[in-house]
Image (cartoon, rainbow, N blue to C red):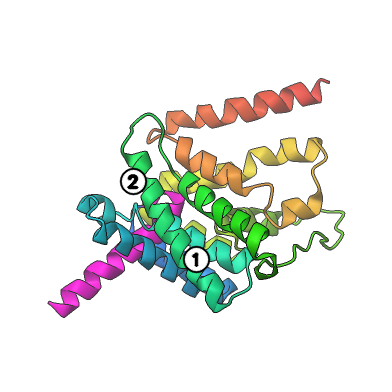
Amino acid sequence: MKEAFTRKSLLILGRGIGQVMFQNNALSGLLMLIGIFLNSWQMGLLAVSGNIISTLTARISGYDCDDIKNGLYGFNGTLVGIAVGVFMLLTVSSLMLMAIASCASTYIARFFNMQRMLPGFTTLFILSVWMLLGLCSWLMPDMLLVSDTETPASSSINYLQCFSMSIGQVMFQGNIMTGLFFLAGILVNSRNAAVYTILGVLLPLPLAILLGADSEALNIGLMGYNGVLCAIALGGKSWMSLYGLYVPFYSLLYCKLWE
C-alpha cells in the first residue's frame, strides 16, 4: 500500500509540473523538473514544494479527485514556488509566503472552475504572485531581489539560444539545456504539441526582428515564451489548425514589409 501511495503521489506531482505546459503526463513533468534542476537546484525544490502545497490544499479542501489526479491544482503552485526563487530572497519568511501563495492559487483555481466561460490557465499563478509581490513591496520591500535591468550588449541573434530559452522561460529558466528538456517533455506526450511549441518560437521571430526587437531580449527568451504557450494552448488536434497560427503572424509580417 505504501508503494502504491508513493507511485500515485509521484504521478500527481509529475502531472502537476507537466500541466504548466498543458501536458497531462507524469513523464513530461519529470523531464521538465530535471530541466529546472539543471538550471537551479533551489528552483527545483521550490517547484516541487509549491506543487505539493497547492495539491494538498485541494485535497484537504475536498476538491474534485480527478482534477487533483490530473495535476490541475498543482501547476500554478509549481509556478508560484519558482517565482519566489526568481523575485525574492530565500528566507524563512519568503518560504512561508510561498506556502500561502501556493494555497491561494488553489482557491483561485476553484473559483475559476466554478464557471465555464473563461478557463483560468496560469491566471491563477499570476494573481497569486501579484498579490504576494504587491504585499512585499508595500510591507517588506527588503525581501525582494533587486531587479538587474542591464543585460550584456549583443548585436546578433544566437538562434539556438533564442529557441531553447524561449521554451525555458515559460518557467523562468534561462538555460539552453533546460529548454531542450522542456521540449523533450512535451514531445513524449504529444508530437503535435511539440510542433506547436517549435512554431510558437519560430513564427514570431521574423516580425520581432523587423520591428527592431532587442537581440539580447530575444537571445534570453523574453520575447518568445508567450508565443510558446499561445501556440500550445490554441493549437488543435488537427494539423489543419496550423493555418490558425500561420495566418495572423505572417499577415502582420506582410503588412510590415509593405509599410
Going by the image, does 145 lie left or right of 22?
right
Observer able to see residue 73: yes
183 to 196, vertically: above or below:
below
Q: Which residue is mark 1?
A: 98
Q: What secondary structure is marked by label 2?
A: helix
Q: Is residue 26 visible?
A: no
Identify residue type, mark 1. Answer: Met
**Residue 29, percent from left and from top:** 40, 62
The location of residue 86, given as percent across then percent down, is 62, 65
- Magenta segment's dominant SS is helix
> Residue at position x 40%, y 64% from top?
51
Q: Residues within 10 Å of mark 2 (few under 14, many from 20)?
A: some
Estimate the x, y position of residue 234 in percent, counting from the top left.
Answer: 47, 35
Q: Secondary structure at mark 1?
A: helix
Q: Which residue is mark 2?
A: 110
Q: Is residue 13 magenta?
A: yes
Residue 143 left/right relative to 47: right
Magenta stretch contains residue 87: no
The foreground one among 26 and 66 is: 66
Return the disc, 2 or 1, that comes first in the chain's sequence.
1
Mark 1, Cα crowd under 10 Å, few <14 / some 14-19 / many 20+, is many
Q: Amino acid at mark 2?
A: Arg
Residue in the picture at 45% in, 30% down = 241
* Magenta-drawn segment: 1-23
Q: Quadrant of the C terminus?
A: top right
Residue 251: image quadrant is: top right
